[in-house]
Image (tube, helix red, strand yellow):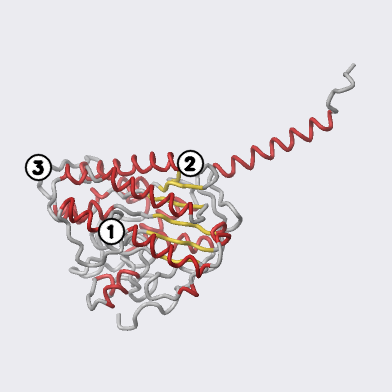
Amino acid sequence: MAGRNAIPPAVISTVLVLLLLSLASSSSSAAGRPAGGPITSIFSFGDSIADTGNHCYLLFRAGKRANNCFLPYGETFFRRPTGRSCDGRLIIDFIAEHLGLPLVPPYFGGSAGNFRGGVNFAVGTATALHTDFLTARLGVEITTTNVSLGVQLDLFKQLLPSLCCRHLFNNSLFILGEIGGNDYNLPLTDGNRFNDIQQLVPIVVGYIGFVLREIIELGAVNILVPGNFPIGCLPFYLAKFRGSSSMEYDPFTGCLAQLNKLSEYHNELLQAELSRTRRLYPDINIIYVDYYNAVLRIYQAPEQFGEGSVQCGSPSVKPCDDSSKYVNWDGLHFTEATYGSVARSILEEGLFTHPSFILSSSSRIARDSGDYFPNSF
C-alpha cells in the first residue's frame, strides 16, 4: 500500500509530460530554430559575397568605377547592374526569398527610415581587420574603400536609435560574413609570403569572434556565420600560380591544395571560436555555415549540379550565353547558379550548417529592394 505522502500517479504523469515538452523545446533550440518567432528582417555584414550595392555606391560617390557596376553584371536576374559581384542573385538574396522578405537593401545610398526590415552593411573588398593594421603588418594598401568589419559594426551601432528597440532583433536574422577572405586575398595578390599570410588567420578569426559577441550584446539572437570558400579552386589563383613549384594540385579537383588548406585552417579556427562563444551565450542561436564544402562538392562533381566549365563572365572576355552552366562568374566570384545551389543546400536540404539551420519557407516572390542604385550605371 502506498504511504500517505506518496505522489499521486496523475501528478507524476503531468510532470513527465512537462519534462518531455521541455526537452523537445531545448532540442529545437539546439538545432538552430530561430528564437522569438518568424524572421521579419535581415542584417548583414561582410564583403563582396554579400554586398548588394554598397561598394559601387561608394566608388560612384568618389568618382571611381568598378566592373560590377556595369553589365554584364546583374544581367541574369535583374537585367541591369545592381552592384552585386555576380550575374544575378547572391546567397543573401536567396535567403531573403526563402523567408518571403524583400531583398536586403544596402546601407549606403539608403534611408534609415527604410531599414526596419533589415539592412546590408557588406562592402566589396572589405576586410575583417582594419586596413591600417594590414598595411602595417604586410604592407597591403587598400586603394578602393575602407569599410572593414569594425567600420560596419560602428555603422550598425549608429543606426540603432532609428531601429526603435532591441525587441526587433528577436525576429531578425544576422549574417556575419563571409568575411576574412580579403584579409588573405589582398596580400596574396600583392606578392606576400604565404607563411606571413597564414599567421594572420588567428588574428582574423579572433576579431570576427569579437564582432560576433558585440552584436550579441546589442541584441542579436539568430546569427549565421559562414566560413571561407575553397579559394584554391578560384580561376584567378589557378591562373596566377600556374606552374608555381610552391603550389601542389589536388588530383581530384585540380584546385591548389595549399590555398585550400589556408581556407580550411581559417574555417577550423572559426568553428572553434564559435564553440567558445556558444558556451558564453548558450541561449543564442549561432550557426556555422560551411561554404567551403557546399562549393567544393560542385567542383568535385559539376555534372551533378548542371554546371561544367569554371569561368564565365569576366569583363575582359565575351560573356557566356548561359551562365547557369558555369561555376565561376569573373574569376573570383561565383555565378547565380552556384550561389543558388549553395543556398538550397542550406535552406532546403539542411546541409552544411552546424548545428542544423531551421527556417520556415514562404512562396512570396522577392522583389528588388528599390531605386537606391544610381541611374547612371
- Is 243 rendered above or below residue 317? above
* Circle 2 residue: 280
Q: Amino acid at mark 3?
A: Ser
Name the front one of labels 1 and 2: 2
Q: Along the polypeptide, which appears first: circle 3 or circle 1?
A: 3
Which one is nearer the viewer's eye here, 167 or 115?
A: 167
Q: Residue 318's image quarter? A: bottom left
Around disc 1, counting alpha carbons within 10 Å, would you say few (fewer than 14), some (14 to 19), or many (20 or more)? Answer: many
Q: Position of residue 10 (x, y in %)?
A: 84, 32
Residue at (40% x, 77% y) in the render: 372
Residue at (24% x, 46% y) in the render: 200
* Circle 3 residue: 245
Q: Along the polypeptide, which appears first: circle 1 or circle 2?
A: 2
User: What is the residue that sits farthest to the top in this orientation?
Assistant: 1
Name the front one of labels 2 and 3: 2
Q: Amino acid at mark 2?
A: Leu
Q: Residue 124's image quarter? A: bottom left
Q: Is residue 96 left or right of residue 82?
A: right
Which label was assigned to residue 328? 1
Q: Is residue 1 left or right of residue 288?
A: right
Around disc 2, counting alpha carbons within 10 Å, would you say few (fewer than 14), some (14 to 19), or many (20 or more)? Answer: few
Q: Amino acid at mark 1?
A: Asn
Around disc 3, counting alpha carbons within 10 Å, would you say few (fewer than 14), some (14 to 19), or many (20 or more)? Answer: few
